[in-house]
Amino acid sequence: MVYSVWFDYKQHGTPGKHIMKIKIEYLDDQRSYLLTILYRNLLKGLFGILLFDLVLFLIIPYRQGLHNQIAKCSIVDEGA
């Protein structure tokens, strides 16, 4: 979790996201950037342990995990 929060905060995405040329877009301007990152990654860890997000990942349009929808984030192409 520390790895993911650090890269998301400092470089706006982990090295894997940079390789795949995608980035996280934050949709809630009212909330702190760091708080949004922490919230998103906490949910990602919780849902990952429960395998809940993995199952939903296969049926949710645009392959957005539930952790992104709850944290009000979206994964987009870097060119978008």
Image (tube, rainbow, N blue to C red):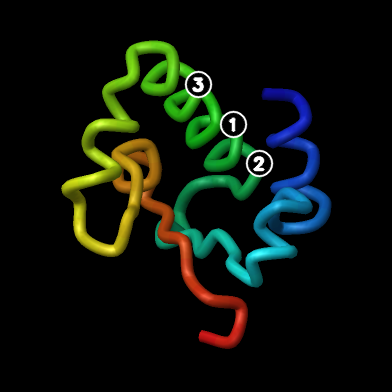
Give, as a three-letter code, the residue at label 2.
Leu
Secondary structure at numbered mark 2: helix
Q: Which image quadrant for residue 37?
A: top right
Ranked by sequence position, the earlier of labels 3 and 1 is 1
Image vertical order of residue 27 relative to residue 15, above or below: below
Left or right? Give the position of 52 relative to 26. Answer: left
At horizontal 55% and vertical 59% (from top left) the residue drawn is 24
Place of residue 75 in the rendered image (x, y in percent of width and height, measured from the top left): 46, 61
Q: Residue at x 49, y 59 (%)?
A: 26
Please tell me whether mark 1 sits on a helix, a strand or a loop: helix
Q: Which residue is mark 2?
A: 34
Location of residue 15 with respect to 46 vertically, above or below? below
Of the pair 58 and 11, the residue shown nearer to us: 58
User: Which amino acid, mark 3?
Assistant: Gly
Give the Cα distance between marks 2 and 1.
Answer: 6 Å
As helix, strand or loop, the secondary structure at mark 3 comes to helix
Marks 3 and 2: in contact by CB < 8 Å? no
Question: Is disc 1 surrounded by few (<14), some (14 to 19) or many (20+) residues within 10 Å?
Answer: many
Viewed as shown, does residue 28 lie left or right of 3? left
- Seen as rendered, the residue at the extreme left is 59
Name which of mark 2 and mark 3 comes first in the sequence: 2
Residues at discs 2 and 1 in contact (Cβ within 8 Å): yes
Q: Amino acid at mark 1?
A: Leu
Q: Position of residue 54 (x, y in %)?
A: 33, 32
Residue that appears at 59% across and 31% down: 38
Quarter of the image where the N terminus is located: top right
Q: What is the number of the mark on residue 38?
A: 1
Residue with the mark numbered 3 = 45
Residue neighbourhood size for the residue with mark 2, other residues' Cα within 10 Å, grouped as few (<14), some (14–19), many (≥20)? some
